[in-house]
Image (cartoon, grey):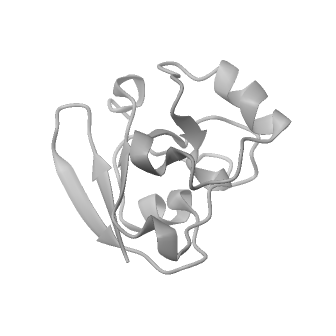
Amino acid sequence: MNIHFVQPDGTKQTVEADLGMTVMEVAREANIAGVLAECGGGAICSTCHVHIAPEYFESFPAREPTEEMLLELAPGRDGFSRLSCQIELTEAHDGLVVTVPAEQSEY
């Protein structure tokens, strides 16, 4: 399956991913700029914040309260924000497009 990561300047990197991985794991393996994932997927920071393309957003389970709380602290949060460590890939996500928030792109 392919996941497309888009940087704030519009550059796109397509990465091959395995079912069951989280978007954060895919981003870390591919060295996607701006997805730091400092806590390693423990949902205790918001450094893996991404924007999910609207057409895919509802294909993921709803945010848990902890994720909601962490996203409140994330710069650039919008209605399609998720912590990439909290979203696991299924067959429905082939072609998923995620955008790195501009506030994280400098990292």
State which quadrant residue 31 falls in.
bottom left
**Residue 46 left/right relative to 69:** left
Judged from this view, the residue extending furthest toward the right is 65
Q: The C terminus lies in which quarter of the figure?
A: top left
**Residue 48 left/right relative to 1:** right
Q: The N terminus lies in which quarter of the figure?
A: bottom left
Taking the spot 50% from the left edge, 76% from the top edge, the residue there is 91
Taking the spot 52% from the left edge, 45% from the top edge, the residue there is 57
Relative to 63, is 93 above or below?
A: below
Q: Which percent across, then down, holds residue 48?
A: 55, 43
Relative to 34, is 93 above or below?
A: below
State which quadrant residue 8 falls in.
top left
Taking the spot 54% from the left edge, 64% from the top edge, the residue there is 25
Q: Which percent across, then down, holds residue 14?
A: 25, 64
**Residue 22 left/right relative to 6:** right
Q: Which percent across, then down, holds residue 66?
A: 82, 36
Q: Which percent across, then down, holds residue 93?
A: 46, 66
Relative to 60, is 79 above or below?
A: above
Taking the spot 76% from the left edge, 40% from the top edge, the residue there is 44
Relative to 51, is 95 above or below?
A: below
Out of 66 and 95, give the one closest to the viewer: 95
Q: How many labels sit on residues? A: 0
Out of 33 and 95, give the one closest to the viewer: 95
